[in-house]
Image: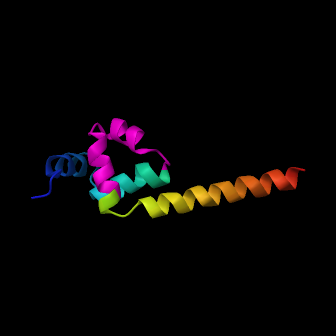
Amino acid sequence: MHPYQEYIEKLENEYSKQIEEIIHDYYIVQDEGPSVTARELDIPRRAVLHFIYEYNLRPLKHQNIKKKVAITYNNLRAAQ
């Protein structure tokens, strides 16, 4: 049994999506951190961190951060 099975069942029933999709939506698409994601989903932060590592979402989050920094940098250079 998964260590966070009760949270998986709760969220999958509530959102009618797989847990990976739910965490991806909050953590990547909405660009929330683990604490905000946990608060929004009403689950412990440690569970969110577990899912982030289990579904290997950190590298994707870091890619998004790099893209945002590059876009901001390019916009600032263009404004000068």
What residue lies at 43% left-to-right and 59% top-to-bottom? 58
| Furthest residue toward right | 80
Q: Name the residue nearer the viewer: 63 or 39.
A: 63
- What span is in magenta? 30-52
| Furthest residue toward left | 1
Which quadrant is the N terminus positioned in? bottom left
Q: Is residue 62 left or right of residue 54?
A: right
Q: Is residue 31 left or right of residue 2?
A: right
Q: How far from the left and from the top, in percent, is residue 51? A: 30, 55
Q: Is residue 4 in the magenta section?
A: no
Q: How far from the left and from the top, in percent, is residue 26? A: 42, 48
What residue lies at 58% left-to-right and 55% top-to-bottom? 65
Q: Is residue 24 left or right of residue 60?
A: left
**Magenta highlight: main SS:** helix
Q: Is residue 31 in the magenta section?
A: yes
Q: How far from the left and from the top, in percent, is residue 49? A: 33, 50
Q: How far from the left and from the top, in percent, is residue 54? A: 29, 61
Corner quadrant of residue 78 = bottom right
What residue lies at 75% left-to-right and 54% top-to-bottom? 73
